[in-house]
Image (cartoon, rainbow, N blue to C red):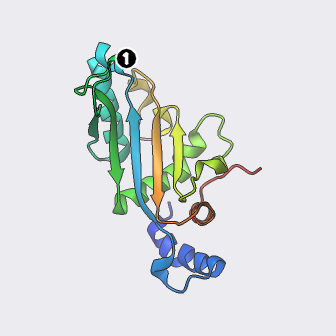
């Protein structure tokens, strides 16, 4: 697998400088962090306490980092949510772990996704960040399909310091993300 950090430094920065006319290497947009988030269905998590543990182990296997438990900010009686309820688990990747995860996502995970035809262009927001929803955690190579009790999805948000959608989209294309053609 290609080391994406070296690819960014040696290929992507000069390419972005020629396309957008940047004068300085530090002005070129870069990927700042990757956030992996799994939302928990409150009813499912309350009935089955092992589900939270399963999701926790999934994130730990995929990222190599212990996730943070996200609690509800306030109690809402209409939704039967208390501020002590866990509503999700998330972790943030930066540095070398971020580039390792990114390489695995581009080269292994996305091609293994069922009925994958490319990432829609609208997944890149106006600030140049990419949000990908993955329906099954089975597509990651660290997950053993035989040991899975319950299938759940996860969300991957790749945050850049690109100023607009065009620059962010070009950055992701140069990294090798498979975008859906119109």
In this view, 21 is above or below 106: below
In this view, 78 is above or below 172: above
Which residue lies under the disc numbered 1? 78
Secondary structure beneath dot 1 equals helix
In the rendered image, residue 45, in percent from the top left (x then y), is placed at 32, 20
Residue at point 39%, 40% (across, down) = 37
Lateral position of residue 88 relative to residue 156, left or right: left
- Image quadrant where residue 75 sits: top left
In the rendered image, residue 151, in percent from the top left (x then y), is placed at 45, 25
Residue at point 47%, 32% (across, down) = 153
Lateral position of residue 131 relative to residue 95, left or right: right
Residue 3: tell me if it is visible: no
- Image quadrant where residue 93 sits: bottom left
Residue at point 52%, 37% (across, down) = 134
Lateral position of residue 124 relative to residue 85, left or right: right
Q: Nearer the viewer, residue 141 or 40?
A: 40
């Amino acid at each position: 697998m290609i080391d994406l950090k070296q690819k960014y430094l040696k290929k992507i920065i000069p390419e972005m400088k020629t396309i957008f006319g940047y004068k300085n290497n530090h002005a070129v947009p870069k990927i700042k962090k990757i956030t992996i988030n799994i939302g928990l269905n409150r009813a499912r998590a309350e009935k089955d306490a092992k589900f939270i543990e399963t999701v926790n182990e999934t994130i730990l296997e995929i990222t190599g980092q212990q996730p943070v438990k996200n609690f509800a900010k306030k109690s809402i009686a209409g939704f039967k949510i208390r501020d002590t309820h866990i509503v999700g688990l998330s972790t943030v990747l930066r540095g070398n772990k971020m580039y390792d995860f990114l390489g695995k996502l581009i080269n292994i995970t996305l091609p293994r996704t069922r009925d994958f035809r490319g990432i829609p262009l609208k997944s890149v927001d106006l600030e140049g960040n990419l949000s990908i929803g993955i329906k099954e955690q089975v597509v990651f190579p660290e997950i053993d399909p035989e040991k899975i009790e319950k299938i759940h999805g996860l969300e991957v948000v790749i945050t850049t310091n690109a100023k607009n959608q065009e620059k962010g989209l070009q950055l992701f294309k140069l990294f090798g993300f498979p975008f859906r053609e119109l």
